[in-house]
Image: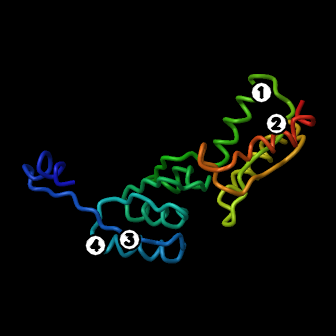
Amino acid sequence: MTEVNDRYFSKHGHELRFEVAETYGEEVTSIRKTADLWTKDVIGYLGPQETCVHEGRMAAAFNLPMISYFCTHNETSNKKHFPTFARTRPPDLQISKSVVSLLLAYNWTQVSFLYRASDNGEFDAVAETLKTTLRTAHIRIRSVATWTDIYHHGYSSNPFERLVEDTYVDTR
């Protein structure tokens, strides 16, 4: 940040500073922090990660840009209600439509659906959205299987060998 300030901003009498506001993934805390930052005259928001609907509406009300790096809520794509909101990760429905388009392009009409099931359910919403989108596109889900541990190639056991062994007969 020092380099950016020295090179670009200081010669115009400006300084770029970051104000960190940890929300711990809690919506009420995130809403409070969004308002608190506004009272400190921030010029934009990077984040939040876990929640973003109410925070995005607040950013719009304050006419401040908000760039979320993980927001998955589809409603924040409505530019009428979220004109200052942008994201770096597409919403679950857009991801699902992309997967379905690819499957249909290759005439795949039956699939086995595999996804990581975690304690906090971080992938459950996208999995449910994708399953619904597959069914709507008349792609038959022959089986659903999950694994729970994070897989690091070469460092942990490979869950996919068992999953493929368990599902390949129904998938073909």
The answer to which of 89 and 137 lies nearer the viewer is 89
Image coordinates of residue 108 in percent, x first then y, are: 82, 27
Question: Disc 2 or 1, which lies upstream in sequence?
Answer: 1
Gap in Å between the C-alphas at discs 2 and 4?
48 Å
Q: Earlier in the sequence, mark 2 or mark 4?
A: 4
**Res. 93 in view:** yes
Instruction: Looking at the picture, tell me which residue is in the foreground, 161 or 137.
Output: 161
The amino acid beneath tag 2 is Ala
Residue 106 position, x and y percent, is: 76, 22
Q: Which type of secondary structure does the marked residue at label 2 adopt?
A: loop
Which quadrant of the view contains residue 99? top right
Q: Check disc 1 and report the residue beneath it.
A: 104
Q: According to the image, label 2 marks what residue?
A: 137
The residue that appears at 60% across and 43% down in the rendered structure is: 154
Secondary structure under the numbered disc 1 in the rendered image: helix
Question: Given contact means CB atoms under 8 Å apart, are the residues at marks 2 and 1 in contact?
Answer: yes
Residue bearing mark 4? 40
Residue at the far right: name it. Answer: 170
> Which one is closest to the eye, mark 3 or mark 2?
3
Residue 35 vs residue 1: left or right?
right
Q: Assess disc 3: are there few (<14), some (14-19) or many (≥20) residues with their C-alpha within 10 Å of its C-alpha.
A: some
